[in-house]
Every structure is written in C-alpha cells, then in structure tokens.
Amino acid sequence: MSVLLLAVFMAGCFSTTPVQVPTASSATPVPSSSIPAISPTPTSSAQVACVDKDCFITAATDCKGARLTLTDEAGVFEYSSSSTACVFTKTLVSLTEGEAQDMKNLLEGKSMTCKYEKGKFDSRLVTSLIYGTEYCEGDLKEALGALIIFT
C-alpha cells in the first residue's frame, strides 16, 4: 500500500505521457500551419478532444467542454470539463498492472468532480493526483483521503 501512496504522490511530481483514446466521435485533424500544436481538435460544438495537458488546461480555464486521457506511472486517467459550467471531472480508469488487486478494487473506476470559476482552473487537478482537490467531491477523493490517513 505504501508503494501506491508513493506512486500517487510521485505522479504529481513527474510529467505524464498523453494518450489519445479514439472514439466514434473523434475527428481527424486537418494539418494547417495556422493551428498551434496545442489546439484542441473539435469533436462536436460542445466538446474538444485534447491530446495533451496544455490543451486541456486551456479549455478548462475558459470553461469549455474538453476530454483528455493520460497514462502515467500510476495508471490511466480520464479528464473532462463541462461546456455548460465550470466543472471538472477526474476518473482513475485503471492502475498499473503491478498494483495489488485490493488497491485496484479501491481506486479503479472512481471519480471526483470539482467546481471552479472561469479563468481560475487549478492546473494541479491535471498534474497531480492529490493537490488542488479542495473544491472537489466524489468517491475518488474519499478513497485517496482514506489511503493517506491510513498509511
């Protein structure tokens, strides 16, 4: 259990490797010299599919709908922001294969939702597992809190 806690803590200290998960609604980007590398790729009028943290943080800060899937040393995470309100959701999809089954049962599939003001998105919500969660609620936050307290 202390190995996971260390990995959780370390996940916030290292950069993550972006992974784009194809969906039926994903649009194929059209190359253009006028579009910067971090520009989101539209999937609908209400949501963009980001391929990196910078794209997602920019969209979330502007309270635009966006999705991002990232894999790091702790596991796979999905991030989304709402286009109708400044609401962020983080889901721990899966832990790394080497993690204990009881830890997987405790954390996998759990989510937390965070509210924020336009222009004030806390990027630590994407770059760290535990930091920036003061205004969040949900079973992922509760499970992580229990791990920290009991470790």
Image (tube, rainbow, N blue to C red):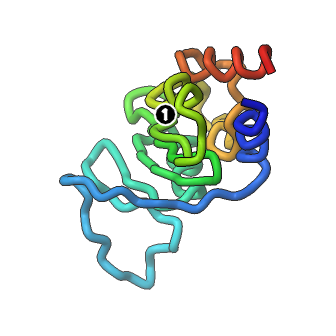
Q: How crowded is mark 1: few (under 14 residues within 10 Å), some or many (20 or more)?
A: many
* Amino acid carrying mark 1 in the image: Thr
Furthest residue toward bottom: 33
Residue 113, visible in the rendered structure:
no
> Which image quadrant for residue 106?
top right
Q: Mark 1 points at which residue?
A: 91
Residue 122 percent location from the top left of the image = 69, 37
Q: Please, is residue 72 above or below residue 104 in the view? A: below
Residue 51 percent location from the top left of the image = 46, 61
Classify the position of the N terminus by image quarter. Answer: top right
> Which image quadrant for residue 71?
bottom right
Q: Which residue is drawn at 25% across and 49% down?
A: 44
Q: Which residue is drawn at 47% across and 64% down?
A: 39
Q: Please, is residue 33 above or below residue 26 in the view? A: below
Q: Please, is residue 13 above or below residue 142 in the view? A: below
Q: Residue at x 75, y 39 (%)?
A: 3
